[in-house]
Structures are given as structure tokens and as C-alpha cells.
Amino acid sequence: MSDTVDPVEIARFLQSNPDFFAHNPELLAQMTVPHPLGGRAISLTERQMLTLREKNRVLEGKLGELIQFGEENDGISEKVHRLCVALIAAETFQAVIHLLNFHLRDDFAVPHVALRLWDKPDGIEDLPEFAAVGDELMAFAETLARPYCGSTTGFATPAWFGEYADHIRSQALIALRNGGGTIGMIALGSEDAQRFYADMGTLYLERLGEMISAALARVARHPQ
């Protein structure tokens, strides 16, 4: 018969008898374990205190992250609200375009913004926003259930950014819709390859697309 004690059996026994040490406090006082950072042996109670402190440290770190995320979301919400109010006040197509460029670049720190609309309403002058867009890109916009975020590779959209085309490393493409139909697309570009990445959240980008679509549809009905 072996004198070796199976640690698994001991663990099972203690799990099945959680009050064991309550009935045998003298054993608990006599037990020691190695210090987690090496050196002297410490009591089981002291080891438990170290474990609790480490858990608290981890929880404090997670709480700090949640607070930071909350503050960042609050800041974004304020920016979206400012843009929404400005778009509501805009009375012409040109005013909407100006406000988009101003807020996205100065408030949201998006360095490059390009807008393309498929059809030019009557009464609006020829602008870069009505430049021809390839059928493939228009078809892609139709399939966008949510904004695309990622590389510019394989897309014709970098050309929309003019002289900065060769420097754009990441982009967000947002389809613009009116009454269910796609009327255009807005592209946000950055020289930072990680500014717009595939797994990033797109909630605010979706809201941005809805706001822009509504504003453009409104001013298109009354261009002057």
C-alpha cells in the first residue's frame, strides 16, 4: 500500500467539506506555503491576503479601463451631437459639405474626408462630390450592411483623396441611403494603418452615415 497522498483526492475532500478548517483551526494556523515571489514561507492566511490583493489590483485595472472607455464614449457622443445640430441648421448642399469637412477633420480628427453621390439634384452646381464612380464600387456600397473599416488595398477610393491618395493606409467606407436605396458613400481616410481596422466598433460610424444621409436628402429637395 502506497504512503503517497494523492493531492487531487485532498482537493476533492476540501471542496466537499468547506467547513473542515472551521472545525480544525489549529491545522490552519500551522500550515505554511511558499511566498509567491520566493524567499520565506508564509502562513496560509497571509498567502490568502496576497491573493486577494492581486485580485483587487486586477479588478481596479479593469475598472479603470471601463471608466476610460466611458469617458471616451461620452466625448464621442458630444461630438456627434454637435455635428447633428450643425447639420440640422444647414440650409444648402454646400453648407452640409462644409460642415462635414469641418467637423470630421477638426472635431473628430479625421485627416481626410471624401464624399461621392451617385446623382446630382437639379439646381446644384457641379462639384467633386458628383464625380463619376465605377460600377464595381457602387455595387460594393449596395452590399454594405455596416461600414467597412480596413485597408485601402483593392479599392479605387484612395483616388478620392486627391494628392494624398498614395499616403492613405486605412479607411472607413460608409454607405449613404435614402428610403432604403443607396445614394452615395463617404470615405474617411488616414495615414495610420491602425486608425480604421477590421474589428473596430462601427456604431458611431453607422449613426454618422444616417445623419449625413438625412441632411443631404433634405437639402437636395431645396437646393437653393
Image (cartoon, helix red, strand yellow):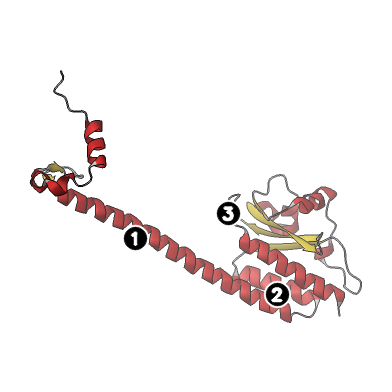
**Residue 69 in the image: x percent, y percent?**
48, 63
Q: Position of residue 48 (x, y in %)?
A: 20, 50
**Residue 60 image label:** 1
Q: In the figure, 127 relative to 24: above or below?
A: below
Going by the numbered disc 1, the residue's amino acid type is Glu
State the image coordinates of residue 199 (x, y, percent, origin top left): 58, 50
Q: Which quadrant of the structure image shows residue 18?
A: top left
Foreground: disc 2 or disc 1: 1
What is the crowding at mark 2: few (fewer than 14 residues within 10 Å), some, or many (at least 20)? some
Q: What SS does tag 2 mark?
A: helix
- The mark nearer the N terminus, 2 or 1, is 1
Tag shown at residue 200:
3
Q: Mark on residue 160?
A: none
Residue furthest out toward the top: 1
The foreground one among 202 and 196 is 202
Between residue 15 and residue 73, name the one nearer to us.
Answer: 15
Q: Does residue 93 appear in this view?
A: yes
Residue on which the image places disc 2: 99
Residue type at mark 2 is Leu
Mark toward the start of the polypeptide (2 vs 3): 2
Label 1 secondary element: helix
